[in-house]
């Protein structure tokens, strides 16, 4: 949960993940996919909690443990989707220097994807409310594409 900024006050103040989601079925589904990804047990954690033998290795590329960070930022099997979607993030930020700063720091990129309102970003990136909403919507679509593509690859093996 290190990537999730808890809103204060907690009551009557929904997180940006839900604030940015319009009441449309596909948008709610995207938000749900992202919420699950934030809290989801990937291969690395499944290995720790499963009584049977489960490998932590990414089922897509086979080169690293399947962590949230690996899936979102470095899995070679998802690089084309990542590149296609980062162009949209660059357009939202509308500042090449900020985009470069974010994409050169994998931790910052993962943080922007999972929760662009997190206080750890405030020293590096100042976002307008509209940018926060647009980034949240973009990241929900991005997470949906990654998870869908992951499922397709795994089911075809």
Image (tube, rainbow, N blue to C red):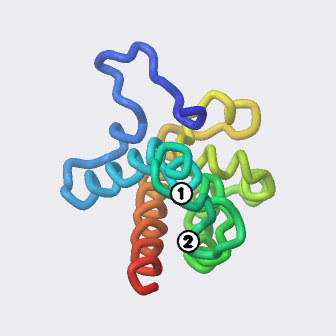
**Residue receiving disc 1:** 43
Task: Identify the residue at image location x=59%, y=63%.
Answer: 91
Element type at mark 1: helix
Task: Please give left or right for residue 150 compared with residue 96 in the image.
Answer: left
Q: Nearer the viewer, residue 65 or 108?
A: 65
Task: Identify the residue at image location x=44%, y=69%.
Answer: 145
Task: Identify the residue at image location x=45%, y=16%.
Answer: 8
Q: Give the mark nearer the N terminus: 1 vs 2.
A: 1
Residue 50 pos. (x, y %)? 46, 49
Q: Nearer the viewer, residue 28 or 132?
A: 28
Tell whether label 2 touches label 1 (CB within 8 Å): yes
Residue 52 pos. (x, y %)? 46, 55
Mark drawn on residue 59? 2
Outermost residue, bottom direction?
Answer: 156
* Depicted 74 relative to depicted 68: above or below: below
Neighbor class of circle 2 (other Cα within 10 Å; few <14, some 14-19, many 20+) is some
Q: Nearer the viewer, residue 18 or 97?
A: 18
Task: Please give left or right for residue 111 compared with residue 149 in the image.
Answer: right
Neighbor class of circle 1 (other Cα within 10 Å; few <14, some 14-19, many 20+) is many
Residue 139 pos. (x, y %)? 49, 56
């Amino acid at each position: 949960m290190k990537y999730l900024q808890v809103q204060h006050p907690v009551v009557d103040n929904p997180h940006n993940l839900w604030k940015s989601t319009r009441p449309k079925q596909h948008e709610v589904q995207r938000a749900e996919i992202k919420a699950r990804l934030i809290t989801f047990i990937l291969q690395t954690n499944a290995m720790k909690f499963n009584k049977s033998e489960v490998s932590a290795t990414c089922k897509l590329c086979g080169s690293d443990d399947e962590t949230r960070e690996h899936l979102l930022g470095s899995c070679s099997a998802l690089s084309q989707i990542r590149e296609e979607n980062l162009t949209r993030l660059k357009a939202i930020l509308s500042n090449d220097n900020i985009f470069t700063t974010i994409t050169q720091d994998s931790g910052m990129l993962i943080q922007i994807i999972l929760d662009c309102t997190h206080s750890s970003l405030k020293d590096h990136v100042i976002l307008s409310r509209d940018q926060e909403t647009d980034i949240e919507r973009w990241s929900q679509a991005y997470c949906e594409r990654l998870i869908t593509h992951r499922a397709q690859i795994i089911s075809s093996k």
